Image (spheres, helix red, strand yellow):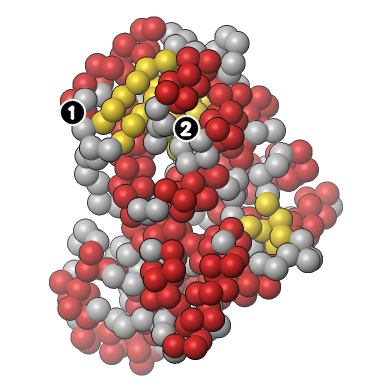
Amino acid sequence: MTESHCCSLDVIFVDDEPRLLDGLRRQFRSYRTEWAMRFANSGEEALRMLREEPADVVVTDMRMPGMNGVELLNQVRQDSPGTIRFVLSGQTDQSELLDDIGNIHQFLQKPCEIESLEHAIRRTCTLAAMLESPRLREIVSGIHSLPIISESYNKLVRALEDESCDFDAIAEIVEQDVGLSVKILQLVNSAFFGIPRKTASIHDAIVMIGTQNLLHLAMSAQIFDTLSQSSMSKDVVTKIWGVSNHLGEYTRHLAIRGGLSTESADGVRFAGVFSHIGRAIIAWTMPFEFEEIIAAARENQTPIRDEEIKTIGVPQEYVGAYALGLWGFSDQIVESVARQCTPSTSMVKNHEHPLLWLHLARAMMKPSEYTDRIGFDMEWAQSIGFSDQDLNDLRSAA
């Protein structure tokens, strides 16, 4: 995402070590005119600060006397659901975090490089600005994870309990459900498991976590928000996840045809898979508004995206990008999801970026019940080195 300093960002840093708080004050001194920063030496003090004045972001140490970091963020989620919640965790903290893992947006490894923390906070500022509605930010910030189809969850648990089931079979189950995919990649690419190498592969993520750890997460932690058989949103989300997976495969296909390596194309695939999570979030958390949006799009024969802007103020891709940014996904994925319909508003400079291939796939793929076809921005594509001949070649091969 394109970043800028943000005048309205209010951050509370929490640590019981005075020298660490002093270090944060020094490191972020240059932001004093643009960020409102407060420093608390305990969870109790941080909550008092929040009651006096809301905060956009709380960054807390995990291990503190009295109220620990998880207890603090649990309370923050209840009192101020729109506040972004970061925890600084060590590799020995997993057991303490497990039961409340859904209340934490991002895990940062302690000791945390100041550049990583600065980047996470600055990106939060940029993404929050995309959702002007406080209600929308509160809704997205308040959810544990994306909705997961109950059958997918049940299949996953059965497979994990079956000792004869291999990683390939488990990965196939996860890949069919976008909600499961997002949560597993969020965890494995965060500091939660202390794994140094990031991955965009579900198979590799499961290998890194291990089936027993994954089973423990699935059985004991409230991190999977499953949609029951009677859920009004279940049919909608199931259809959106199906289209998203198809779009992901098509995006990957185009990228390979366009000359990207298999490894790069695998990463590009997730731009397509995650492209419509915002629409699923709207359907799940705002069902009445979603029904109005779909009804208006059908009656007026207008794109669903246009009706989203009329009804909730922003298109679904902004909602999805905000959620992915909160959960620590890469800038490339977040930027691609956010700008998939309007790539000229991005700062992308090369044609290997996932945004090009997602934008192209959206333009070439037929619309469905819950997705729109968009026009391809050839002028922008040419500005990053993608020619008319490239487009014609891909159309011929599609």
> Is the residue under label 2 in contact with that under label 1 (CB below 8 Å)?
no
Q: Nearer the viewer, residue 351 or 81?
A: 81
Q: Is residue 79 above or below residue 207?
A: above
Q: Residue drawn 35% across and 89% down?
A: 395
Furthest residue to the bottom?
396
Q: Please give the name of the residue rendered at 62% of the width and 36% of the height, measured from the top-left corner.
A: 101
Task: Measure the alpha-carbon separation of dots 1 and 2.
Answer: 23 Å
User: Where in the figure is residue 196, as x and y percent of width and height?
Assistant: 47, 36
Q: Which mark is residue 373?
A: none
Rendering coords of residue 185 (x, y %): 55, 49
Res 310 visible: yes
Residue type marked 2:
Phe
At label 2, counting other C-alpha atoms closer than 10 Å, the crowd grade (few under 14, some 14-19, many 20 or more) is: many
- The label nearer to you, 1 versus 2, is 1
Badge 1 crowding class, 10 Å Cα cut-off, few under 14, some 14 to 19, many 20 or more, is: few
Closer-to-camera residue (91/243): 243
Q: Residue furthest front?
A: 52
Q: Is residue 333 left or right of residue 78?
A: left
Q: Left or right? Give the position of 71 relative to 315.
A: right
Q: What residue sits 38% from the left and 63% below the top?
A: 313
**Quadrant for the C terminus in the image:** bottom left
**Which residue is tagged 2?**
86
Q: Is mark 2 on a helix, strand or loop?
A: strand
* Quarter of the image where one finds residue 131: bottom left
Instruction: From this view, report whether residue 345 is shown above or below residue 323.
Output: below
Which residue position is annotated with label 1?
33
48 left or right of 357 in image? right
